[in-house]
Image (cartoon, helix red, strand yellow):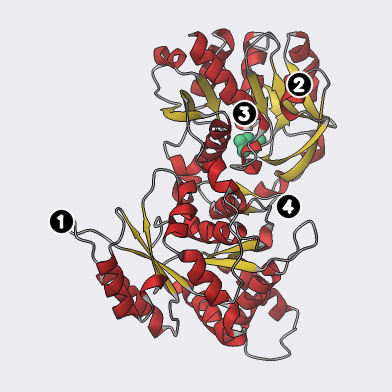
Amino acid sequence: MSGLGKGITAASVGRILKNRGYWVTAVKIDPYLNIDAGTMNPAQHGEVFVLKDGGEVDLDLGNYERFLDIELTSPHNITTGKVYRSVIEKERRGDFLGETVQIIPHITDRIKWCIKNAAEEPFPNGTTADVCLVEVGGTVGDIESMPFLEAIRQMRGELPPHDYVLIHVTLIPEDTMGDLKTKPTQHSVKALRELGLHADIIVGRSEHPISANTKRKISAFCDLPQNAVISAATVPDIYEVPMEMEKEGLADVLTAHLGLGKKEIDTAWYRVVTKEYTNRITVAIVTKYGIEDVYISIKEALKHAGRALSTEVKIAWLDAERYERSQLADYDGILIPGGFGKRGIEGKIEAIKLAREKKIPFLGLCLGFQLATIEYARNKAGIADATSEEFGEGTHVIAILPEQEGLTHLGGTMRLGDYVADIRDGTSARNLYGKESIVERHRHRFEVNPKYIPDLESAGLVFSATNKNRMECLELPGHPFFFATQFHPEFKSRPTNPSPPYLGFVEACRMNKRTK
Ligand code: GLN
């Protein structure tokens, strides 16, 4: 079922193998009909993660990138929409030569092709993966996941015996007496069997660790050895999951199944992700959605920077439409994340104004960058009715650039994925990144309107990184930390390689707290 932690489990399995020197890649299967997550409401599905090639994908790909320290591409997120579209296009071209086109074999063949195609995509150094994780979203028994489960059933027979292992993640609930119940696991294993699938390893998700007795029961009912039943109890931080599974002996079971030799484990990653905290800060994030899943990458990027600086980052989620203005100055820093649409923007602009005037560290991301520009235009550059073309009438200091006009299709005008930004010398951006030019991921439609840049700059705002006529970073000299990016640096943040703007922000929050 959803929300169980299949993504984190898959990512952790990958990390365990990676710590032994294996190259690991990952594929996420989402059985919905959407072609990609780009058009999906984040309040329902969580964050839309953006890949370097501009793919707008399920948030689990973010977990894979962070846990495995890799960069994935769009083919690594397979959806029913993508599979059917390609099969139907082939049919229209007449490529099936009069055959009846059916779910089995045409859709299942295409699914297998998509998995193999993604698995074989080389890493930038030319190496291909030793292991590809394939996470099948949804629940066993769902109508829409049937073709995918059938495809992975067929793959078992087609691959050499040691090239396939099936891990089943199940919920082990507690009854009112606090006893762990294995019944749901027995039933889902039975449902799998009906589809011809046999679980080689069972990962049992529970609130508290699973006892040897419970494991024995699962082992007996589900036809697998006891050491193939892995307890995955809830832990305070997701980065502890691989370590916990390591303790459960998952590595031995996995490598035995996959015929991989025993290799020395490198524990460096474990040490970095569990570094002790010696400080604590609280950051206010002013948002439209009160749902944390929408901002996973931001949360994780703050955590990565925090670990590196031994600082625990607590987050206060403030509703842009009704937060208590007087309390804002109590936080150690203010962050305005990305977003679409008009709702809540005035509350966010007020928060930015307060951060600017009261010298509270501020980090603005994408929409946050655009709103910082609007706030400055209104209150410092004398453009009282400054706004974005996205929000309606007014002076459009944020607008669709002339070269984008005419593209009316919603997805058509979006600037997605990796773009270079050139950083101006002598700026905070240059200090943070320590480089003249960077590559970061984007997901936006509107830009700073070049017409108003002279006014904004002569009023003191500095656009410290640019891509031709597009503004990529802004900052305010003389403020302890007032920094915003048109791109989303959180997508490239890794536990072992925190994102520079986040590092700068967390450090500034820490200083702010100390001097308060
Ligand atoms: N809505 C803004 C735009 O389309 C910002 C997008 C974002 O924050 N990801 O440009």
Q: Nearer the viewer, residue 392 or 274?
A: 274
Q: Residue at x 56, y 41 (%)?
A: 272
The type of residue carrying mark 1 is Thr
Q: Residue at x 50, y 31 (%)?
A: 343
| Secondary structure of the residue carrying numbered label 2 | strand
| Secondary structure of the residue carrying numbered label 4 | loop
Dot label at residue 503: 3
Q: Which residue is mark 2?
A: 463
Dot label at residue 330: none
Up-down relation of residue 454 to residue 105 (above or below): above
Structural crowding at the residue carrying mark 3, measured as other residues with C-alpha within 10 Å and reported as few (<14), some (14–19) or many (≥20): many
Q: Which residue is mark 4?
A: 53
State the separation of the CA atoms marked 2 and 1.
59 Å
Which x, y percent locates residue 25? 64, 62
State the separation of the CA atoms marked 2 and 4.
25 Å
Q: Residue at x 62, y 43 (%)?
A: 494
Structural crowding at the residue carrying mark 4, measured as other residues with C-alpha within 10 Å and reported as few (<14), some (14–19) or many (≥20): some
In front: label 2 or label 1 = 1
Up-down relation of residue 304 to residue 258 (above or below): above
Q: Which residue is mark 1?
A: 176
The reply, left or right, for residue 190 in relation to residue 71 is left
Given contact means CB atoms under 8 Å apart, are the residues at marks 2 and 4 in contact? no
* Res 336 quadrant in image: top right
Residue 117 seen in the current view: yes
Which x, y percent locates residue 397? 70, 22
Up-down relation of residue 516 to residue 342 (above or below): above
| Secondary structure of the residue carrying numbered label 1 | loop
The type of residue carrying mark 2 is Phe
State the separation of the CA atoms marked 4 and 1.
49 Å
